[in-house]
Image (cartoon, rainbow, N blue to C red):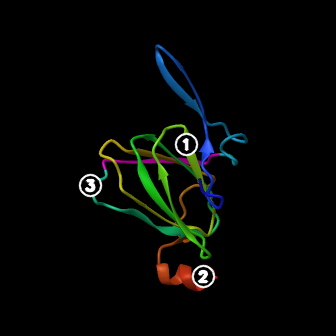
Amino acid sequence: MSERYPLIRLNRRGDERGALVVAETGRECPFPVRRAYWVFGTPAGEKRGFHAHRKTRQFAVCVAGACSMLMDDGKAAETIRLDAPENAIVIEPEVWHEMAEFSPDCVLLVLADAPYDEADYIRSREEFDRLFKK
């Protein structure tokens, strides 16, 4: 378990009919959601992400399958494995993140506190290091 990037344990409920996981704004998800997107069908060996946001906060959960997330705030980098639908992680602004090791059935759901804005992205690792490397 990471202290810098803690997993958020979502409430899983279920019975013989199946399972249900809940994430509510202001509870498990610490911000109002303005955008949702999901990543799926990622070929074996492929990596995604390779950016940071200037202001946007995100809440990520693998609703199916698993993937690993490299998180780097400029002070320390850690790899977090998302491998259960009841585990989520918050990606704060100014954190470089890369996703890798996608299982074939992975569906990564991401909730964001802002609509898409290309100007919010830092897509150059060199620029990120210059701004945030400590």
Q: What residue type is labelled 2?
A: Lys
Question: Which residue is located at x 50 percent, y 24 percent?
Answer: 19
Residue 100 on image: x %, y %: 38, 59
Give the residue type at disc 1.
Asn
Residue highlighted by disc 1: 87
- Indicate which disc, 1 or 2, sits on the residue closer to the N terminus: 1
In contact (CB < 8 Å): disc 3 and disc 2? no
Q: Distance between the residues labelled 3 and 1?
A: 22 Å
Q: Work out whether residue 30 or residue 68 is closer to the camera in this orientation and state it.
A: 68
Q: What element carries label 3?
A: loop
> How many numbered discs sit on the rendered protein?
3
In magenta, the rendered stretch is 33-41
Q: Provide residue 37's location: percent of width, then percent of height.
A: 47, 48
Disc on the earlier residue, 3 or 1: 3
Residue denoted by label 2: 133
Where is residue 82 shown, x and y percent of the image? 48, 48
Kindly indicate the quadrant of the structure image that contains residue 48.
Answer: bottom left
Residue in front for this viewpoint, 111 or 15: 15
Q: How crowded is mark 1: few (under 14 residues within 10 Å), some or many (20 or more)?
A: many
Toward the top, the furthest residue is 16
